[in-house]
Amino acid sequence: MSKRFAWMLGVAMLVSIGLLVACGSNYNASSDGLMLVGSQGSGLVETFSFNLGSGHVSAISNTPNDTSSLTCVLNGIPSSLVVDPAGAYAYTIINANSLCTTDPTKPSTTGILAFKVGSDGTTTQVGNLVLFNQGIVTPCLPFLPPAKGCQPSTSTEQVPVLPSMMVMDPAGKFLFVADRATTDSTGLFVPGAVSVFAIGSGGAATEVAGSPFFTSNNPMTLPQSGLDIVSVAPTPTVLPLVGINGVRNAVCNDLGNNPATLQYLYAVDGLGNQLFEFSVDTTSGVLKNPATLGQQPFPTDQIPAGVAVDPCNRFVYVSDSLTNRVSAYAICNGSTTSPAIPCAALVPGALVEVAGSPFGLSGSANSPGPLVVDAFGNYVYVVGTLSNTVSVLKISPITGSLTATAPATVATGVGPKAIAIRADDSWMFVSNFGSSSLGGNTVTQYLVTPQSGALTVQPPIQTDNYPWGVAVK
């Protein structure tokens, strides 16, 4: 082989490799999915495309090679992340970080940022950070010793909320945010609440009137912490779409099944081991709290951490982090799975615990946290936050009871924080917050087999430092 020919061949190979890399980084909505992840280390949102057939992943924007040395790009720390049902807009909570305040005129604050998802898979910020309304509470006035306890003040005070987990309702109309228990300026404890944002034209998010919403009509500060709202989940007002060739149909796609006209929101109290029901005004997003509904909270197992509603509007599932179990409830909504006798005496949307609940997790699962129900209502996927696993549980379509599948657990990376499943039930992703040396700073990708719920682990996706929220289109 002549030197000239060898040189030309080498150039041709380099050009071919370059073309392959360039083509691999393109996003085609007809053949690719899109995964978004928030990096707390760099303070930004990354996007990755993946081929819907092979799962092959390509980095699109804010790739680790480009941004791993950056910090505070969004002037705060992104946490929970969602994308709307159409895949047109994404939303993330930005938590204030004093380390990001290098410009006194632009302090780091807590709020929600909206992004438009482009046809090329990139994201563009829409408008400015939308700040959270403060909670209005009544200060506790301690009785004089030796009397204990306190009485309500005649005035109120405003206290910043502490947002945590965020979800979007299946119709794409509202964002619901779980607000954790916090303290006021005097050190008294403020109960958790739920903040609600309505989605308007152009993807704009606006907090609804009266938000945040507490579980009582007159929330008070307390000497001890209580009512820590750690997770929320709304019931659906739209049903899943019919799948391809009838293979991936939801169990509620039967002819004659109509979407619900009433909507409820369930909020988990991680301190009180209980689950609260709110009703949702589907026009305004305003919530009616359990006290107004005359509804007592529903007991859970110990230290509940996550909640999910099945997309067919039948069952609610709560992860119990201390006991490694999942509590299951049937919704009183008049459906065929609604228990007639208990529900007859309860308000609409009330929950009845499923026989055999709570259900234990098998294998190495430890400290269950975030959980999702697959897009067609057949399986529950539960993240083991201390075991670095995902558990797969089969849903009984009649009773809502859960049965572990084999294998009992599938591995994630280190420090799993969030889970998202694609609306066609084909791919699932888990963000891993742990250090790179231990298998963190990645997103674990799974191929889902809808008929069995089985997960096939794909090569890990390298991200920027400390990924948290994850969403999929």
Image (spheres, rainbow, N blue to C red):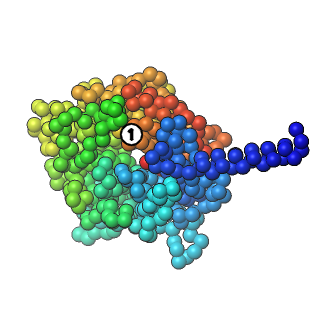
Identify the image quadrant of the N terminus: top right
Name the side, left or right, on which 349 lies relative to 23: left
Image location (x, y in percent) of residue 379: 36, 31
- What kind of element bears circle 1? loop
The amino acid type, in three-letter code, at marker 1 is Asp
The residue shown at (30%, 38%) is: 242
Q: Mark 1 Cα within 10 Å, few/some/many (few <14, many 20+)?
A: some
Image location (x, y in percent) of residue 139: 30, 64
Question: Does residue 280 appear in this view?
Answer: yes
Quarter of the image where one finds residue 144? bottom left
Extreme bottom residue here?
Answer: 105
Comparing 8 with 48, the one in front is 8
Name the side, left or right, on which 420 lies relative to 199: right
Name the side, left or right, on which 69 lies relative to 322: right
Q: Pointer 1: what residue? A: 424
The residue shown at (53%, 64%) is: 74
The residue shown at (18%, 42%) is: 258
Image location (x, y in percent) of residue 96: 49, 63
Q: Is residue 413 above or below residue 399?
A: below
Comparing 211 with 20, the one in front is 20
